Image (cartoon, grey):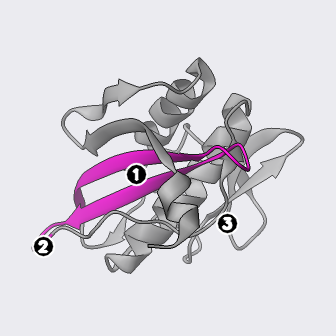
């Protein structure tokens, strides 16, 4: 096993379903991470294109050498077997504020959802909306440049 993976510590486990929302089963992360996860959970049932997400399992991993946390996801979409835990993207420092933690988690979860052959979140004009920090606020930006704070998405009209 690569030394990087041997050093990582699981600091959160939880899940999300459309009916129950975010459920954290264990966590040693600071409160901003839990607030961020709840905000992300609000957006998960919104603006899905393709198969519907039925369930996501989460494990947040901490790297003591770099001080960063990565949220790994296992996404299950309707009609398919569950995916394995993983994530590739940006981690955030363990002492990050809500919006920095949220941007990191949104990036990591969005990529795992895409690997499950579902587009989320989908913009009004088509295409993925991507997570960004704008003036310290985590937002979704669509391909037209319009932004919506993460955690406030509504279903497309």
The residue at 65%/40% (across/down) is 101
**Residue appearing at x 67%, y 66% in the figure:** 142
Give the mark, 3 or 2, whose residue is nearer the N terminus: 2
Closer to us: 91 or 45: 91
Q: Quadrant of the N terminus?
A: bottom left
Q: Earlier in the sequence, mark 2 or mark 1?
A: 1
Residue assigned mark 3: 142
Marks 1/3 in contact by CB < 8 Å: the verdict is: no
Q: Magenta segment range?
A: 53-81
Residue under circle 2?
81
Q: Residue furthest right?
A: 135
Disc sitting over residue 46 in the figure: 1
Question: Label 1 neighbourhood size at 10 Å, few (<14), some (14-19), many (20+)?
Answer: some
Q: Position of residue 155 (x, y in %)?
A: 42, 50
- Marks 2 and 1 sit apart, C-alpha to C-alpha, by 22 Å
Under circle 1, the secondary element is loop
Tell me if 32 is positioned left or right of 26 in this view.
right
Gap between marks 3 and 2 measured at Cα: 30 Å
User: Is 31 situated left or right of 17 in this image?
Assistant: right
**Secondary structure predominantly adopted by residues drawn in magenta:** strand
Q: Which numbered disc flags the more N-terminal residue, 1 or 3? A: 1
């Amino acid at each position: 096993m690569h030394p990087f993976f041997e050093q990582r510590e699981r600091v959160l486990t939880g899940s999300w379903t459309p009916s129950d929302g975010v459920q954290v089963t264990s966590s040693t992360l600071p409160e901003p991470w839990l607030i961020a996860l709840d905000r992300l959970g609000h957006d998960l049932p919104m603006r899905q294109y393709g198969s519907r997400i039925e369930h996501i399992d989460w494990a947040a991993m901490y790297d003591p050498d770099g001080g960063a946390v990565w949220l790994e996801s296992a996404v299950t979409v309707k009609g398919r077997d569950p995916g394995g835990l993983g994530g590739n993207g940006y981690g955030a420092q363990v002492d990050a504020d809500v919006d920095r933690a949220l941007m990191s988690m949104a990036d990591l979860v969005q990529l795992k959802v895409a690997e499950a052959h579902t587009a989320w979140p989908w913009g009004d004009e088509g295409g993925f909306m991507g997570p960004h920090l704008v003036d310290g606020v985590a937002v979704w930006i669509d391909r037209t440049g319009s932004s919506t704070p993460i955690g406030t998405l509504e279903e497309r009209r």
